[in-house]
Image: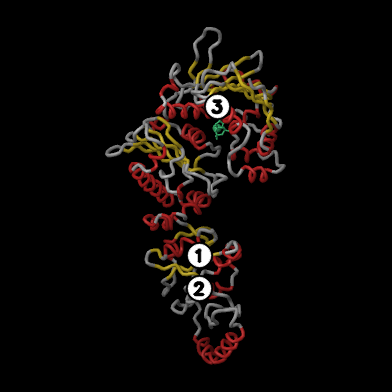
Amino acid sequence: ETSQETLSFQAEVSRLLDIVANALYSNREIFLRELVSNASDACDKLRYAALTEPQLLENDPELRIELSVDKDKGQLIISDNGIGMNREDLVESLGTIAKSGTSAFLDKLGDKRGEVDLIGQFGVGFYSAFMVAQHVSLETRRAGEETGWYWESTGHGSFTIAESDSAPARGTRITLTMKEDAQEFLEAANIRRIVKTYSDHIAFPVELKGEGDEENERLNSAGALWMRPKSEISDEQYKEFYKHVAHALDDPWTWLHFRVEGKLEYTGLLFIPSQRPYDLFDPQRKNSVRLYVKRVFITDDCETLLPSYLRFLRGIIDSEDLPLNISRELLQHNPMIAHLKSAIVKRVLGELERKAEKEPEDYVTFWESFGPVLKEGLYEDRDQSEQLLKLARFRSTRREGWVSLDEYIAGMKPGQNEIYFMTGEDPEVLRKSPQLEGFYDKDVEVLLMCDPIDEFWVPAVGSYQEKEFKSVTRAGADLDNIESESKDESQDTEAESEDSDVEALVTFLKENLSDKVKDVRASKRLTSSPVCLSADSGDLDLHLARMLKQHGQ
Ligand code: ADP
Ligand code: MG
């Protein structure tokens, strides 16, 4: 028999717990949402496992979550008969934090303990129990396994694990010994209200244990929220559901709730977050729209369900047609998944287009969070590039805010046939670039592209509405055909007489710089700076060349 073991929390968890336990967070009651949400996930996981191993559900087929209170001991107990945890699960899940971006988040938080908003954005899941509890213990048994386990901690540096004989037959029982100032969470009225507020949409029954021989009281509506008619779901309910499925704490920017009948039948409830998740650009990051089949959770890791440029989407797709007991691997390649994917893309892009048109200011807040991701679609999904270009917004030399390509084209000068752009790191720096002088002079708008991705999609896409994209740092981006605002005849004659001088200078520079530059040309792009660097039509763009050089390529 193994005795008890004390293990240290991963350093990041310790730091996190320290912040969580001391946060002056007015919204502490969300700890219950987090624990109920985990219990619900555990029930989902068991139901999925039971598709192939039905014996796991035997003896206790009704999945549910039970809350009970022991006032004398000052304890709140949360039990579920879901998947449970074995020793490995415990150490892995409740001793470390898998979330990418944790370090970055903690550094950002620094010693600004008061900035609870950031905690809200990050979401601390299970660890939020330490906002209200001075001691947390749990007993758990993984479905289908013999040994039960005990875990406990006060949230200071370490936790203890031991085998347990009194663990539930299956699932997890968490006991919170509440802090002095958190006794209010032992009141039935408060528990009722909190569950109704945050967890009403949970698909399994959440019950409050009756006292003595009283019956348990059901606290939530229990039932898949997405199956209810839209008219019966309040905005608040949609928002709470989003927080549960997305494991997020912001409010969604918007959502799409739809049911499709016909050849393929499915229901979707998809959310676009308002805030960028910390790991949006983490290469390990996966799509996290959950796939259900007839209300049974299948996976939140179906890579082929969404294109990666829509990876900011959250929510669920529930199919009536997919086979229930298909392995997750086979599922990825099912043609129905491909069909769902293209339907989702169409719907989401359509909704974005509608938003861009109807609520342009609100749309820009979306673009600022997720535009750089959406632009990845420009070279990943050539079928959608026209529509994606329509949705794209840019900084430019001529405007304060954002400009669409349609607006850009509407503002083109007589004689202008190309969409001029310049890439770099910072629009403010680009604005001052000598390469732009000629463009300013003729009042020709130049798009300022500052996302790394811009280097890649522009050459792939080439043009929009038959107007070619043209980098201003390339030779040949000449402005001769565009009428100048202040065209002055006398300048032209003067220029002619200077031509021979210029030729002599060009020859001189070519001879002296032959090992450093490919060519020297006289240009009409510059009006006040004497020279600028430019890239040849077939060569790498200047900013890209610099970027690659920085990465040692
Ligand atoms: P998240 O839910 O976002 O994964 P949490 O911090 O809320 O993060 O939970 C961490 C992990 O602990 C879960 O992913 C799960 O593996 C495990 N866990 C927590 N509560 C339970 C539970 N009641 N039953 C089974 N596993 C659980
Ligand atoms: Mg959780």
Which image quadrant is residue 189 in? top right
Q: Nearer the viewer, residue 283 or 33?
A: 283
The single residue placed furthest to the left in the displayed view is: 263
Question: Considering the image in quadrants, where does the N terminus appear?
Answer: top right
Number of the front mark, 2 or 1: 2
Query: In the rendered image, is residue 384 in sight?
Result: yes
Can you identify the residue that label 3 sits on? 85
Instruction: Identify the amino acid type marked 3.
Output: Met
Marks 2 and 1, Cα distance to the nearest angstrom? 14 Å
Dot 2 amino acid type = Arg
Q: Amino acid at mark 1?
A: Leu
Q: Crowding near pointer 2: few (<14 within 10 Å), some, many (20+)?
A: many
Q: Earlier in the sequence, mark 3 or mark 2?
A: 3
Counting every numbered tag in the picture gives: 3
| Disc on res. 474 | 2
Whole-angstrom CA distance, mark 3 to mark 2, is 60 Å
Q: Residue at x 53, y 46 (%)?
A: 284
Q: Quadrant of ligand 1?
A: top right
Give the quadrant of residue 101: top right
Residue 453, percent across and down? 51, 58
Label 2, secondary structure: give it.
Answer: loop
